[in-house]
Amino acid sequence: MQLKVDHVSKEFAVRGHAKVLKVLADVSLSVAEGELIVLLGPSGCGKSTLLNVVAGFLKPTLGQVLLDDTPVMKPDRRRTVVFQDYALFPWMTVQKNVEFGLKAQGVEPVERARIARDFLALVKLSGCEDRYPYEISGGMKQRAAIARALAPNPDILLMDEPFGALDAQTRVLMQEELARIVAEARRTVLFVTHSIEEAVFLADRIVVMSSHPGRIRSIHDVGLPRPRTPRTRSLPEFISLTQELWDSLKPQWRDDGVEARLQREN
């Protein structure tokens, strides 16, 4: 399996104006099977838009996305998405939430129940099958969302700031859990974040994006050993790359903050 983003640009019409908003400009990227690629950059740099184009939710204005040389035209089971807000159905149990995609594929009830239990075990939610989303914590909800995304056996897992709504401690624990889950499930992942430390901890490669419009600014190989553990964060290589990325991105984040304030004032 290979994912290729080929010279993708994306524009949106601005309501009430003749002009268009250019969100992505000439983005090209190749993702190999088994890679965990992190898209890193400030808010508004087009990270989530690029993820939505790869998912098939949005069509590029120019360029194309190819999966094994086949153009991506719409969402399908080869690419599943984990969102920041969990997107679990509140009227379904955890088990039924994980079974949802399998049911849509026509998998028989006994088999989809087995698959759902297997993935709930993978994300350490065995025993929570009959609970409803309101009965479990935020971290548990996100693990259930990951299990649901993995259950249909996708080629690529797309994750749009999935830990952004969690408290700091839970977020760190979920990063460690995701590193373990992805390694055990052997999945390709495209992960969006604005957290430098999260990017360095998780990624095989970090794609740094700049804004106005969104472009790939640089790509960094992360040579940290796997499995990633709490000790990974204290390695000199981790600290050095985190600082390098911070020094590179700090001017952009500062400038974007000034621009946002000016827009609000005007």
Image (cartoon, helix red, strand yellow):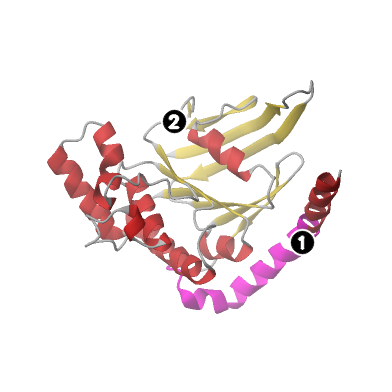
Which residue does the numbered mark 1 point to in the structure image? 250
Tell me the amino acid under the disc marked 1: Lys
Q: Which residue is drawn at 54% across and 57% down?
A: 164
Q: Which of 82 and 221 is in front in this view?
A: 82
Quarter occupied by residue 222: bottom right
- Give percent across and percent down for residue 53: 55, 34
Element under disc 2: loop
- Give percent across and percent down for residue 128: 25, 60
Q: Residue furthest left?
A: 110
Compared across the picture, whether 224 is left or right of 14 comes to left
- Give percent across and percent down for residue 95: 24, 50
Q: Which residue lies furthest to the top in this view?
A: 18
Q: Residues within 10 Å of mark 2 (few under 14, many from 20)?
A: some
Q: How crowded is mark 1: few (under 14 residues within 10 Å), some or many (20 or more)?
A: few
Q: Give the range drawn in magenta.
A: 225-253
Which residue does the numbered mark 2 point to in the structure image? 75
Q: Residue at x 81, y 47 (%)?
A: 264
Q: Which of 105 and 139 is in front in this view?
A: 139
Compared across the picture, whether 145 is left or right of 12 comes to left
- Give percent across and percent down for residue 120: 27, 56
Rendered-image quadrant of the N terminus: top left
Q: Which of 263 and 249 is in front in this view?
A: 263
Q: Nearer the viewer, residue 29 or 16?
A: 16
Q: Residue at x 66, y 42 (%)?
A: 46
